[in-house]
Amino acid sequence: MTTGEKPAEQPNSAVSSDRWTRSDQERSTTLEEYETIFDAVEDAVLLLDVDRTADDRTYRYRRVNPAYETITGLTDTEIRGRTPAEIFSTETAAAVTERYDACVEQAATIDDETTLSLPAGERTLETKLTPTVENGTVEQLVGIVRDVTAQTRPERELTRSRDLLEKAEQLAAVGGWELDLRSNDLRWTDGTREIFEVGADYEPTLSAALEFYHPADRDRIRSFVETCRDGGEPYNVVLRIITAAGNERWVHTVGEPIVDGDETVALRGVVRDVTARKERERDLQLFQKAVEQAGHGIVITDREGTIEYVNPAYERDSGYSHTEAVGRNPRLVKSGKHDATFYETLWETICSGEVWEHELINRRKSGELYHVEQTIAPITDDDDAITHFVAIESDVTEQRLREQRLSVLNRILRHNIRNGMNVIQGNATRLRNLIDDERDEALTAIEEQAAELCKISDNAAAVRDLFQRDRHPDATCDVGAMLSRLATDFGDDYPDADITVTAPDPVTAQADDRLETAIRTAVDNAVTHTDRAVPEITVSATSVDGPDTGDWVDVSIADNGPGIPPQERPMVEREAETQLVHGTGLELWHIYWIAKSFGGEMRITDNDPRGSIVTIRVPAATT
């Protein structure tokens, strides 16, 4: 996909993602949901920034929620942006700072219980601190605080368990469970019964509950439960179950121990039906595999035109890796072959919600031009607002060249050879009744036509060889050295022509020996079709670069002859023949196809004061 510059008057749009993520609107909704949870959650939450100096480490409160204000007796305004020493008493500030230091130094979650003197009074707080690590450094701390002043430790553990179960019952497709290890009583909430599709009066035993798990996962869940019971290790896994109704489901099950002193007295946890999520993940994996293996290049951008995803086919066609492409604009493959109107039409089409289809010319990272057939379609959300664009493109460079070759060779066989044979047959018939001088004239015509047909045959064979060869992707040639060598050959091959070769300093192009074939063909064409007693031909090479076109090497062959026939100039410019516009031979097409095989092009311009200039443009070698 190549979008070029987006017209100023167009609304924001563009193309989208290897990260198959939610839309901007969905992410915004999620942030709003987190904000609501932050304010409404019963537990106190605090966010701290870790500020460092050369000799010290300081903690500043970034934000606290209303529950934290209630526990401490301080408002968000009194807390935000301040350090513990600026808020609490010396003893309390030292105690909380010690916990913060431990979390930072261990770079791991810590969970403890401390009694502190706060403006709201003395409180026993259960605190869990979790560090946020970036580039190996703890930058922030997130704290969850619960006031457990009025409870003994076993009571607090059981209360937490009951709270967990009650909250689980309030959530759709979420259930809770608790196993009392002293009585071996297992309690399921209604949500759990609903997931396992059992009756409201069903009272499970541990062994019966584990039998609901899929045979392939049954040993795993037993092992998790035993390790949690005997070793105090919590578990958090996604496994399959077979419900009482015989339905297979995926559940996310979590278990943790409840400890009283050194004894694990109970296990508790939650179970959540994640079947729909697993099915979506499976569908997504299948879709992603299909996209990754697709033969067509696929590009997805956000509505601002920033690439979020490219598939391997696009990497192959463009030469840009996923890492190089993501985060950039699709115009990284812009070739400069399309004007502003082209891109305005593109944007007007896709911004109106329509699908855009076109063939265009892109430029690979290596500098080669290539043709793609491209379709760009908008992606909309539930409100029909455009959120992304997806482009699917197919590299049709080889297909175009193949079709051109078939068309031109068909024309050669159908038109040129037929006309040549008509001349030969007509003159052969005349020979029967001609006198000597006329017979010589007819024989000369036959010889000339035969020679022309042989030349066409040789050119057709050269074209065949061209398309049978594959250029090595790393092939390069020193154009200056090549021209220096050709200068001597031209002097020997065309003694009656005035051929000047300008050999520049080393100029390296992405090409192989076929570039030399194209130059020789252009020079021979100029000498053969001249109308001058002494044809004057100049061969030169120059380096060309531009912001929209990249780096090129131009090899120009200028002559003082009659010029390229008018019917052949449009043929090259349109890159196609028609019944009214076609060439007389294969020479120009041969040169054109060689240039295209290198990802370049051929141009024809008028020479001053007369004649033509054939320019073979090929990509400059990359360093």
Image: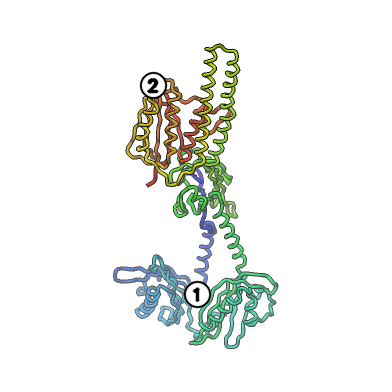
Residue 623, placed above or below residue 238: above
Residue 368 in the figure: left or right of residue 168: left
Lateral position of residue 238 relative to residue 489, left or right:
right
Residue 358 lies, in percent from the top left, at: 55, 41
- Residue name at image x 43 percent, y 46 percent: 366
Q: Secondary structure at mark 1?
A: loop
Q: Which residue is mark 1?
A: 43
Q: Are marks 1 and 2 in contact (CB under 8 Å)?
A: no
Q: CA distance from mark 1 to mark 2?
A: 98 Å
Q: Which residue is mark 2?
A: 534
Residue 373, image quadrant: top right
Residue 562 seen in render = yes
Colour scheme of the rendered structure = rainbow
Which mark is nearer the camera, 1 or 2? Answer: 2
Query: x and y percent of residue 484 in the render?
Result: 34, 35
For the residue marked with disc 2, what is the amino acid?
Val
Tell whether 277 sits left or right of 475. right
Q: Earlier in the sequence, mark 1 or mark 2?
A: 1
Task: Report the front residue among 543 and 210.
Answer: 543
Check disc 2 and report its element: helix, strand or loop: loop
Residue at image point 68% right, 77% down: 200
Q: Residue furthest left?
A: 55
The crowding category of the residue bearing disc 1, from other C-alpha atoms within 10 Å (few below 14, some 14 to 19, many at least 20), is some
- Where is residue 316 shown, x and y percent of the image? 49, 50
Say which amino acid is labelled 1. Asp
Taking 331 as reference, is 504 above or below it?
Answer: above
Q: Residues within 10 Å of mark 2 (few under 14, many from 20)?
A: some
| Tag of residue 592 | none
